[in-house]
Amino acid sequence: MSDTFVYYAQLVVDGLAQGAIYALMAIGFAVIMGSLDLVTFTYGEVVMLGALAGGYYGVAILKLGIWLSLLLGFAAAWLVGMFIDVVCYRRWPGGPPEVWLITTIGISTVLKSGSQVLFSTEQEFVPDVMDGMWEIGDLRVLHIQVLIIGVLFFLSASLWVFLGKTRLGMQLRAVSMDKTAAALLGVRVQRVMTIGNAIGCALGGVAGVLLGAYYNSVFAIMGGVAGIKAFAAAVFGGLTSIPGAALGGLLLGVLENLGVDLFSSGWRDIIGFGVMIIVLLIKPSGLLGRKGAEKI
Amino acid sequence: MISRLVRQERTVFLALLATALLAFPLAFRENNYILRIAINIFLYAILCTSLNMINGYSGQFNIGQAGFYCIGAYTAAILSTRHGIGIWISLPVCGLMASVASLLLGIPTARLKGIFLAMSTLGFSEIIRLIVLNGGEFTRGPMGIPGIPPASLFGWELGTNFHMYYLALLLTALTVLICANVLDSRIGRAWIAIREDELAARAMGIPTVRYKIYNLAFSTFWAGVAGCYYAFLSNFVSADSFHLDEGFVILGMVLVGGLGSIAGPLIGAAILVIIPEIFRFLAEYRLILYGVAILITMHLRPQGICGGGVMDTGDAGSVRDQDEPPDSEPEPATGGDGT
């Protein structure tokens, strides 16, 4: 294998691991936005709180180990999701999306500044959850990268089974298709939306823990960029589609890594935003989105 | 008859307000603290008025106004420190720079709505900040640009807060006056038509995409002007002052004051600048306060303190009439919890 090939293959591998985190965030985001038709702006803050709970308190302080920490992140983000539902959505069940946009902007400011005040404004260190790597030829694959991709596959598969096979999952899909019809058939729309929103948030929380563990740091203002990345990845794949969100996340991660190689690491976030704006410009329905979806 | 009385009352009120604002600093000439608060109110009033042109009148949803504010401030800083250009030329130039930059955002996103537009404006604002932060020698990166000379008028230095107060008052009055007049023109009415119903506006022959781009450019002009004023006020600019939070602060003020009214953003700016000053001990909770203010407004009075009924939370098809008292109760949900 030539050196250049290995070099770029390495970039792609790192990008895939990073992209898997984006994919997880984007899947949660797609569940909330695409399926439930809930407009959320505070998703980044949910990711951040998941990272604080699982990554900082779980891994660094309580030393729970990675599996329990992931669970902790999941649970914490679930609770935050329930809270957001009560404050931001429930009052205006049929309201125009602008209202949800505004209320979630409000709560996002509260959550972010709240954690800056209560937690810390500094970057907090998260110790390695697993070190070691495999070497395939000259290619290095870290164990944590495999863990991240594994978690992505496990959670996507679980979500797949949940949506396809369980009663609640079918109700959720029914609500996403037509709320009135679902209500007429006896689905408790409000409850299903609450749970769906909580599931989306919980997936974001897990992604937050992985983000903290992968970059060894957690900080209160990480949510802003995380939220935009989740949105960008979800838009990339076509907001309504969960496989699309996963694909979009992985692609975004790889593109970002290749772009950083081309420019410098300070441009990482600019690349993410740029990809989002270009996708919105060229193909607003995304890679796997439904044609003519009235989202734009 | 009644309308003439109301108009007279309004004139009297405005005259009184103008006198009070003109006389105000004479009483506090030495009190820099009070003057600084007043200046901040004016600065945010300009920013809020500019944002209100978009969110309140053309009904688009921009949350990235901080980016254009940043462009104005950096343009002023670079022009004044490296080319010795004073504030009077800088003000329109900064505004135009912001407008030109807004085309980069406006043209691609003119067809987007709702959260897509909101996220794009947010991303754009953050891109501008990151470019400034990574701009190398040109923007001096994270160090910012210090040493902006104070503003001057015919060789007479406007260095004190007392002078800057009058400059801020002048700019605010100019912004509000021009915005109000533009709103009453053909273009302004077209924006309002777009807000009410974009499809109907297009059917009436309004080129909606072009007018939305005009709207963004017009609005961001004033954000650029505010940025220029800010640069000369603080004599130092750095990318830290233009975080996304700054955009949310501006948005919060407009929402609390009321979208779609001239007075709303001014009142919102005044309230949300003064409250944190009263509760100084809550300084680190300042942004939490803004978030809570947004939530309380949405729960209790979604149209804001003196909003023009833009933000109705009932069903989307309802007629929005400014003369009618806005509904205090949101419409009950349709298709809700199986009721």
Image (cartoon, rainbow, N blue to C red):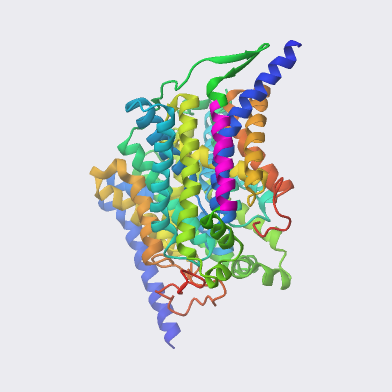
How many labels were placed on the picture? 0
Vertical relation: A128 (above or below) B28:
above
Closer-to-camera residue (A267/A61): A61
Q: Position of residue B136 (x, y in %)?
A: 57, 23
Q: In this orientation, does residue B153 appear?
A: no
Q: Which residues are magenta?
A: A147-165
Magenta segment includes A157: yes
Quadrant assignment for the N terminus of chain A: top right
Q: Is residue A223 visible?
A: yes
Q: Residue furthest right?
A: A2
> Where does residue A215 sit, x and y in percent of width and height?
49, 25
Please report the residue visible at 58 percent of the width from the left and 52 percent of the height from the top: A165
> Residue extending furthest bottom?
B1
Could you say where residue B260 lies in the image, as x and y percent from the top left?
A: 50, 65
Asked if residue B93 is among those painted magenta in the image, a careful observer would answer no
Q: Quadrant of residue A74?
A: top left
- Nearer the observer, B284 or B2: B284
Q: Residue at x 25, y 50 (%)?
A: B278
Say which quarter of the image contains residue B319: bottom right
Q: Height in image: A109 above or below A175?
A: above
**What residue appears at the point 54 percent right and 36 percent down from the top-left corner?**
B129
B244 horizontally vs A26: left or right: left
